[in-house]
Image: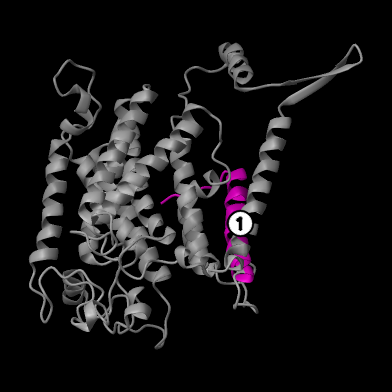
Amino acid sequence: MPLTLYAALWVAALVLALLTFIWVSIHFLSRCSCTLRLKKLICCCEGKYYMEREETTNQASMDLSQPKSSRLKSLDTFRGFSITLMVFVNYGGGGYWFLQHAPWNGLTIADLVMPWFVFIIGTSIMLAFSSMQRKGVTRLQLLRKLSWRTVVLMFIGFCFINYSPRDGLLSWSWLRIPGVLQRLAFTYFILSLMQMFSPYQEIPPTQVHWWIPVQDVVLYWPQWIFILLLETVWLCVTFLLPVPDCPIGYLGAGGIGDNGLYPNCTGGAAAYIDKWLLGHNIYWHPTCKAMYHTTQPFDPEGVLGTINSIVMGFIGMQAGKIFLFYRKLNNKIIIRFTIWAFILGIMAAILSKCTRDSGFIPVNKNLWSLSYVACMGSMSFVLLGMMYFFVDIKGWWGGQPFIYPGMNSILVYVGHSLLGFYFPFSWEMRYQDSHWEPLFQSLWGTALWIFVSYLLYRKHFFLKI
C-alpha cells in the first residue's frame, strides 16, 4: 500500500503532537520564575509540591464547612475523549477505512465509542446515586429525576436526531424508531432502577468477612442475578429462536455473505425481533449493505442489542462501585481495574477465538455481541484506569482539552448532529479524491466543537437534563 495514502494522517499527527508539546511547554514555563543573583540567572519552577504546601498554609483561612468536590476529572476526561472521537468519525474521519464502522464482524476505531459512553453512564450512575443518597434524596425524587431525564433524551433522539423528512413534514413510512440517544436513555433508565431498588443503598462500614476482597460484588448479588438472567435471554433468543428461511443461531450479514446461501437473513434473530416489534421503522442503511449487497433493513440500535447495552452499563457500574468502596485506596482501585480488564479480555478472546469470523460469538458491534461487550468492557477499564492514574492520582494531566466537551457531552453530541454539517463546521469539498481535505475538514469541525465547549466551560454553562 503506498505510503502517500497515509501522508495526510502522519502530517496531522505531527502537527497535533507539536501543538501538544507547545501547550505543555507554555504551561510548564508559566509556573517558573527567574531572578538575577550575582550576575547569574536562577530559575525556579514551582511544582505540585509547592502548590500543595501553599494550599496547606492557607487552609486555616478557608471555610472548612464547605465540602470538597469529589468529582472525578478522569471520568469527565474519558467522556470527553469519547465524544471527541465520536464527532471526528461522524465527520468522516478523513475517509480512512479504520475510522469507519466495520461492515459486519470485527472492530475499527469508530466501533469503540458508543460502548465507552454506556460504560461511563454506568459509572456515573453509581457516583451520582451515592451523592444524592448522602443528601437525603428520596426514592420518589430519584424516580422522578431519572424518568424525566429518560423521556427528554428519548424525545431529543427521536424528534431531532432521527428526524430527516423526505416524504412531507411527517411520514411514518420512513421514520426510524431506534437510535443512539434512545438506547442510551433506556439503558440509563434500567441501570438506575437497578441501583435505586438495590438492597444496599449505602456503602457499608468495613467489617471482617470472608468476602471482603470481593465485597463490591457480593453485596450487590441481586443485580448480578438480574444481569445474568438478561444475558441468558440474549443467548437463548439469539441462538435458539427460529427465524423463517434462516438457520437457527445465524449471526451473519446475509446478502452475498456465506456464499449467498442466506441473502435475507441479515442479523438473524436480532433483525427478526426488530421487524416483528417495529415493522420497517428501523435503519435501512446498515454498514453491511455496501460490502454484502444486503436488501434487508438492520438496526444496530435494535431491541435485542439493547440487552447487552445494559450489560455493558452494568460493567461500568462495577467501576463506580470500586471507586466508592476503595475511594482512598488508589492502589486497590488500579489493581481491581486491572483484574476486571484481564477477566473481560480473556472472556472476549475465548468467545471470539481471537479471530474475526471463526469464533463461538464473533466480535460484532452491529449485534452488540457478548464478545464485543466483553472486549469493550476490558478496554474501558484500561482507559479509565490510565486516566485516573494520570489525572486524579498523579495530577500530571488536567484532562485538557477533552475535559471541556466531557462536561457538556449532550450539547456537543446534539449540536454536532444538528449543525455539524453546516458552515463553518463543514463545507462542500472540492478534492474528495484524496485524504487531505476530508481529514482537514474532520479535524476542523472537531476542533470547533472543542472550542465551543471550552467557551461554555469558561462561562460555567453546562447543559444538564
Observer able to see residue 189? no
Q: Does residue 256 lie above or below 393 as drawn?
A: below
List x then y, in percent, for residue 373.
27, 53
Please state the horizontal and vertical placement of residue 22, each as a whole percent of the image. 70, 42
> Residue at 30% of width from left, 31% of height from top?
336
396 or 323, which lies in front? 396
Q: Residue at x 66, y 38 (%)?
A: 24
Say if residue 234 shows up in the picture: yes
Give above or below for 41 relative to 4.
above
Residue at the disc numbered 1: 447
Q: Which residue sits at x=49%, y=17%?
A: 64
- Give the image quarter of residue 422: bottom right
Image quadrant in which you'd find residue 419:
bottom right
Could you classify mark 1 by the number of other residues whose Cα lies within 10 Å: few (under 14), some (14-19), or many (20 or more)? some
Give percent across and percent down for residue 240. 7, 66
| 210 over 313 or under it: above or below | above
Q: Quadrant of residue 329?
A: top left
Please tell me whether the stretch drawn in magenta is mainly helix, strand or loop.
Answer: helix
Q: Is residue 89 left or right of residue 287?
A: right
**Which portion, as a residue range, is magenta?**
436-465
Whether residue 416 is situated above or below residue 263 in the rendered picture: above
Residue nearer the viewer, 12 or 453: 12
The kind of residue tagged 1 is Ala
Residue 269, given in percent of the width and then of the height, sits at: 16, 70
Helix, strand or loop for disc 1? helix
Give whichever of 365, 328 is nearer the camera.
365
Identity of the residue furthest to the bottom in this view: 167
**Residue 32 located within the stretch drawn in magenta:** no
Q: Is residue 449 magenta?
A: yes
